Amino acid sequence: MVILQNALNLRLFLNEKTTLIIMIKKEALLFAVIGYPIAHSLSPKMHNPALRELGINGRYMPMEIKPDNFEKVFSEIDKMPLRGFNVTVPFKERIIPFMQELSPEAKIIGAVNTVSISEKIKGYNTDADGFYRSLQEDLNFSAKGKKIVLLGAGGAARACIYALAEKGAAQISILNRTAAKAEALAAEFSVHFSASRITAHALKKDELETVIKDADLVVNTTSVGLKESDSLLVETALFELNRPAVYDLIYNPAQTKLLESAKKAGCKIANGKNMLLFQGAKALEIWTGKEAPVETMRQALFSE
Ligand code: ATR
């Protein structure tokens, strides 16, 4: 239960047994990250110092909603005492029917990670922006005219493909364990981005070899690498064919087997921690209209 001082007393029904009673000062702005599970989210750690730094009287808190209760809770979204919130796994797609408006990138990506509640309830996707800003900062990479190998065809892949195609990538080769999903994704994004050649492949060694040979960048959007027992997706010998830059969206562990393998081959590498930072910074800018204090957020996020 979250209780802030005096004035507004708002009730939020999370499920049959739990009522969240929030008392906030009338002028305080409330933000949240909504997901399941949510306890380990790093977002409050970077957003609360950022709100303080901007001089905003507000709080950012984790809100766990059980998947079974999601639709019930969000049918009352207009009564929620929130100025804005982030949405994470597993609700980024399920939140869409509750939006009154969608930003262009959220529409194409088909997922919302940031919601702003003002005159309208509007959904955005700041993952794409966060990913691209991290590519630029961490790998000094610009997508225009480049050839990219993208591993995975799930929700995270959609945000990355959007960012890369929107910035003018020449070729995006999508490789996925389930090849049919890569094919559907390639077909869908080719309609929106006809200037990029977007192709689909099975995630197999011979296919990898063909596309890595002339790739400028390899991006892992799969969940492979989260667990110590996970297999290695790309062997060092394959990276050595061309030494592309390698980006892994996974940041815990900080260096996955994939990044280790790429590093051994002499590739430039980066993990997704700054993607988390920059998607948060962009969300804060949407909510407040102010430039996000990125350095404060970075320090908070990277502190133990
Ligand atoms: P997210 O929203 O994080 O992208 P997702 O939509 O569940 O999560 O997608 C997970 C991605 O990781 C998919 O591309 C999935 O491949 P499939 O489409 O074949 O399921 C990929 N993935 C998960 N486990 C994998 C494994 N053991 N080997 C290869 N790919 C895997």
Image (cartoon, rainbow, N blue to C red):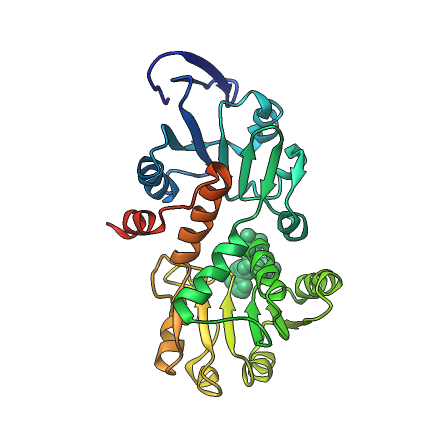
Q: Position of residue 241 (x, y in %)?
A: 48, 88
Q: Is 69 left or right of 264, judged from the image as shown?
A: right
Is residue 230 visible from the viewing direction of this image? yes
Number of on-image labels: 0
Residue 146 image position (x, y, % from top left): 57, 76
Residue at position x 50%, y 61% in the image: 132
At a point 61% along the width and 37% down the height, the residue shown is 122
Ligand 1 image-quadrant field: bottom right
Q: Residue furthest bottom?
A: 241
Q: Quadrant of residue 94?
A: top right
Can I make out residue 231 in this image?
Answer: no
For the point 39% across and 76% down, the residue is 268
Residue 185 at x, y percent in the picture = 68, 61
User: If the image is split into quadrants, where does the N terminus sit?
Assistant: top left
Residue nearest the viewer, comparing 86 with 203: 86
In which quarter of the view is residue 246 placed?
Answer: bottom left
Query: Where 107 falls versus 52 (above or below)?
Result: below
Q: Is residue 205 above or below residue 52?
A: below
User: Residue at the location (45% across, 83% down)?
Assistant: 243
Residue 302 position within the rendered picture, expressed as x and y whole percent measured from the top left: 29, 53
Taking the image as shown, residue 219 lies to the left or right of residue 184, namely left
Is residue 60 found left or right of 71 in the rendered image?
left
- Relative to 63, does residue 262 appear above or below in the rendering? below
